[in-house]
Image: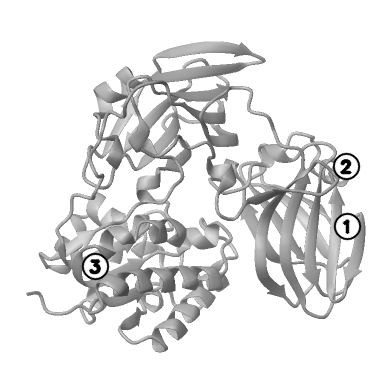
Amino acid sequence: MRKLILLALLMLTLCSPSLAEDTGLVETILFEGEATVETAWTLAASVNTTSANGSFDAGLITEDGYFTVEYTGPIKAVYLAFSEWQSGTWASVNVPGSCVTEGELCIATFTFDQCYIQYGSKDFTAVDQICVGSTAASGVTTIRRIVWHGKPVQDDLGADATLYRGSVTANAANTNMAFVFTSHVGGDFDAAQVNEGSRFYVEYSGQKNGVYLALSSHSGAKQWSRINASEVIELGNGRYASYFDYASFAKTWGTNFARLDQLTVFSSTASEVTLHRLAYFAGEGAPVDTSDGHWDRPDTGIAFIGDSICQNALLIYGDWNTILGRSDCVNYGIGGQTTVECRARIDELAARDYRMIVFICGINDIGRGFTKEEIVANYDAMIAAVREKNPDCEFLIVSTLPTTSAFYTGQQSKINLLNMAYKRYASKNSGVTYVDVYSSFTAKTGDYAYPELLSDGLHPNRDGYAKMAEILKEYLPAEE
């Protein structure tokens, strides 16, 4: 049995902590790679915080710490910014406190004092995204690394896993404030360890009994269940803690924890509620579910894997079989996922005998700040993993769709560049085909989508799926 997971979303792949020599501070790498820009005041790299279901815990930003940005380009020509989506806050530190050079590499330092003066608060937990860009009027600036150097935040709960830490506010009932994927579908939290002594903890401010927990599975167990708190404790300063014991969530959701895919915290009131933390206490006892957790899906046919655009075909429109007029399509879509989570669960598909795998993923990657190179690398790794066990499988990469201005404002060029990267990758790899659905959803490259094809500005409606089906049918093999 695997040991209890002691790390949560704040220690995902992108955040790699190490102890800085002599200072006693911990280095947390927010970004490492190459992000290049050639114009002034242009965003180069961005990292979502745990407040926005990302990887970096902004609660780590405390006094005595500082940020460093390593880059090539003009000296002192980078800025650091803090973005808070709900309030529209954009706080930018335009000039680093210091900048030294090591050969061609510049290392810019942004102190805590600089950051909090511009942001307006010493509490950074509401920050959704940390961004770095260039201020140079000319020349190429390439960001190599973004690092936070700070003291580790002590866990005062003694929880076995902190699954969410941040600050997100809801002003309406049934608002999704935060969600966490389990290791079963590419996340960090191992739900298969749940036993009769386990419980979840939600800390929030606002109205008492202001939250509820939802457990869901896309892989074959019960799809979705609302779990009400077993106990609510007043913590003071307007904060409350709701506990959700095993008896309450097992009674409502069931005990197939090996196939628990997602935990979500929702608001339960129209009054303002702010979520601060979601944690897990393991308790004592043997795991309740000892099954292998495999998805309840056919082993052959055509598999679809991706995000909500992939999954919604099943949840709303009768699945791809109905949309395409077939009977051999298998849906592995999960809303909110990126190619990172899909890559983590591709072995589930590789172990089966699918003729073709259709990928519909990428828009959430753009929202999380991943580069097109990182996204394509994830596709390449998934295809390689499948081919190792199923060399005859073929692959379709469906273009990322445009959105309306309500989603990803100013990001349409990134969608287009990602699709161009897909097309280049497919042209160089046999058995991989790029499917251009994008062009049928917009009047011109780089424009917003036709709103009549989308249900909410992001997801296709019935007409949108019909348009996708019309195009996909040309690439799918005849049904056996």
Residue identifier under label 3? 466
The front one of 142 and 4 is 4
Secondary structure of the residue carrying numbered label 3: helix
- Closest to the camera, between mark 3 and mark 1, is 1
Q: Position of residue 109 (x, y in %)?
A: 86, 55
Compared with residue 331, is residue 12 higher up or lower down, i.e. above or below? above
Residue 363 in percent (x, y) is at 46, 62
Q: Mark 2 — residue?
A: 113
Q: What residue is shown at x 37% (from left), y 74% (from top)?
A: 384
For badge 1, the amino acid type reads: Pro
Q: Nearer the viewer, residue 343 or 324?
A: 343
- Mark whose residue sits in front, 2 or 3: 2
- Residue 96 is marked as 1
* Amino acid type of the residue that numbered disc 3 sits on in the rendered structure: Ala
- Which is more N-terminal, label 1 or label 3? 1
Mark 3 nearby-residue class (10 Å; few <14, some 14–19, many ≥20): some
Q: What whole-number distance in Å separates the C-alpha atoms at marks 2 and 1?
A: 11 Å
Crowd tier of the residue under label 2, counting other residues whose Cα lies within 10 Å: few below 14, some 14–19, many 20 or above: some
Relative to 12, 67 lies left or right:
right
Q: Earlier in the sequence, mark 2 or mark 3?
A: 2
Q: Is residue 230 visible?
A: yes
Quadrant occupied by the N terminus: top left
Mark 2 and mark 1 lie on one chain; the one further toward the N terminus is 1
